[in-house]
Image (spheres, rainbow, N blue to C red):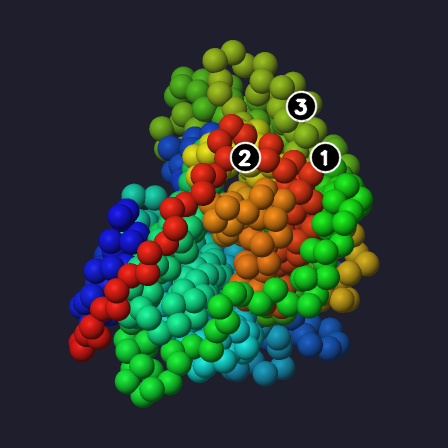
Amino acid sequence: MDLPVRMAGWSARHPWRAIVGWFVFVALCLGAGSTLDRNAATTEDFWVGEAGRAEAMTTEGGLQRKPTEHIMIYAESGRLDLAEAESAARDITDRMEQLPEVASVADPVRSRNGEMLRVSVTLKGPELEGKENVVPLLDQTAEVAAGHPDLVVEETGSPAISKGVNDQRDEDLALSERISLPVTLVTLLIVFGSVVMAGVPLLLALSSIGAALGLSMVASHLLPDPGVGSNLILLIGLAVGVDYTLFYIEREREERARAGGRLSSEALVELAAETAGRAIVFSGLAVIVSTASLYLATDVIFSSLATGTILVVAVAVLSSLTVLPALLVKIGRRTERLGKPAFAAQPEPETGRLVGAVLRRVQRRPVLTLVVSALAMLALAAPAMGMKLIDPGKDTFSRDIPAMQAYDRLTAAFPELLVKHEVVARSTRERSAEVQQALTELGRRAVADPLFAHGAGNAEPTVRTSADGRISVLELAVPHPAPSDEAIESLDRLRVNHLPATVGTLPGVEAGVSGDVARGQDYVDDEESKLPLVIGALLLVTFVMTVVAFRSVVIGLLSVALNLLSAAAALGALVLVFQGTWAEGLLDFDSLGAIASRVPLFLFVILFGLSMDYQVFVVSRIKEAMEDGMTARDSVVAGISRSAKVVTSAAVVMVTVFAGFVALHLTEMKQMGFCLALAVLLDAVVIRLLVLPAALLLLGERAWWPRRPAPSAPAVAAPQRPAHVG
């Protein structure tokens, strides 16, 4: 008897210990997480490429970018009363200078058209901590606005925008939960026909999410958390938590119906553990190992996403092997005492008319089914070849955020604030004057360049130098949004032409360009360079694990091919919908003209893991049918028929959870939710009902090369055990 069966058996014999133990475990995880708190990622954790090296130099010289807020003062209508505006600016300055969060307040600056006054406030601390410290500033701005009712006084900046994005994300997640939880409950009610049994998967999924959230806080002290892991834990946790519980309960119901009252609840749980329990363990392990390939990207965000996924999947598997068997035994005993059947179930799982009709057509014409289905999936995947990647910045955030609306007004009046390139040079103290002269010359070249001159107002940029004279920084303004072609071209021209012709002529001087555009471009380039390694590792791991599980090289190759097909089709549809503008009104988003750079790699890995879920459960049922003595062809139909209902129900739950993210404001989350929901739908319907059975029917016995599943020994009915109490 292997570990899953032993764990389920112990829980079945000691249900109260298992139930209490589980909730104690969840409480301990949450307690440990709350005690240690989250170790947030710092700016240094995001450094990548040339931009990262340049930022390391600015930090070394104490010249790093500081969180900055801008307070705008203008008239709601008509001309600006300059005297009143200057009075409001003095009020703002006095208030801000008294705040402990503020490092400095700049003199007011008037816009070129004279209709707006701007006061810039620099906060203390690192750039990423700005959103935590900005609330007192926003409060003071609101008080000044109330004291000058004839003026509009509003605040924006990276800290205020980041806070707005976080607040919006929290509201979106709450909305997603309000959508997905009721739909999931209704689906489970349809499947089980029992409020109690429908509540079990939700209870375990939510408790697994709680435990994983606590553990993720502990794990953040090894791998810093950039603040995205908790979102994924909620997303994946609800999906796989319900998924695993659903598979286990359905199998227990089958065994109960087949036993016809001859076996105790404890024996039935152990029988379910021998099949569904083992499949859940392997499926969870497949998701964990697949997701672990994200660590190869050596990126703080991907590492956080991988950690969150691994933790919630591992906890969901643990709950299926411990507290779930205990709950099933307690529910089974209660219904037995009441003289009612534990759950309504049939001796054999219902295939359903639709699934049965589909399988009959696949049986009759497997070649046609395989060719047409595969070609349709490849056609859907084709747009992925034209995928463009972008690193989403503040220019791409939802305009429903008040700070973003203010940001648009700010940059319209002061276009030089849209983008700043930072040219950094490091040398020795003795060469400081020489380096500053070269940077000044670079600034003159930039002013004469049409891509820079308009935003800089034709003024000569100034050079800042560290106290020890070793590090110098030149800031260059560009009047174009960071994702625009003009801003990207200005970066290329700076790196390829202006920098080599000035600072680049000085031997022994290390130089680089950072800033909003450089960060995004270098991040995308870094991700694309890691893509072959991550994908290669993912394909290898999927193949090896499938071969180990089913002792078949052909099944391993087929799994890789089918996972590639479903993932590619989903990514192709993602490009088709989100890279253009035709679906903007339909899904309520503003197209970026590209796909968020983190989305494809993350989705590819997660989709492989989730596809393995269905692959394991479906192929396991086919393998069981062969072990029962069926032919290879008959076992395909039997295995898919037996798993169709539960796979469909699980897919409905997953699609609902993921589709809820399409309603969110953040375009990146919309893209993830859409792609995950579509991929699960394609995998459950097209791959598992059409492509997989057609391929296995055509392969026949060859699908199990080099080792066909051996028929199992005839099952001996276990003696009925006495009912336990407590």
Q: Single out the mark in the foreground, 2 or 1.
A: 2
Report the residue marked by disc 1.
489
Report the residue marked by disc 2.
704
Q: Single out the mark in the foreground, 3 or 2.
A: 2
Tag 1: residue type? Glu
What element does badge 1 sit on?
A: helix
What element does badge 3 sit on?
A: helix
Horizontal and vertical percent position of residue 547 = 48, 34
Tag 2: residue type? Trp
Residue at image location 49% in from the left, 18% down from the top:
509
Vertical position of residue 554 compared to residue 569: above or below: above
Horizontal and vertical percent position of residue 287 = 45, 46
Task: Out of 46 and 683, give the one closest to the viewer.
Answer: 683
What's the distance in space between the residues labelled 3 and 2, CA to CA?
56 Å
Task: Out of 195 and 302, give the one closest to the viewer.
Answer: 195
What's the distance in space between the residues labelled 2 and 1, CA to CA?
55 Å
Horizontal and vertical percent position of residue 216 = 33, 54
Sequence order check, earlier mark of 3 and 2: 3
The quadrant in which residue 539 appears is: top right
The quadrant in which residue 696 appears is: top right
Horizontal and vertical percent position of residue 486 = 74, 40
**Label 2 Cα crowd, 10 Å radius (few <14 / some 14-19 / many 20+):** many
Report the residue marked by disc 3.
496
**Residues at badges 3 and 2 in contact (C-beta under 8 Å)?**
no
The quadrant in which residue 85 appears is: bottom right
Q: Is residue 286 left or right of residue 697?
A: left
Residue at image location 32% in from the left, 76% down from the top:
332
Residue at image location 40% in from the left, 36% down from the top:
59
Residue at image location 32% in from the left, 49% down from the top:
220
What's the distance in space between the residues labelled 1 and 3, CA to CA?
10 Å
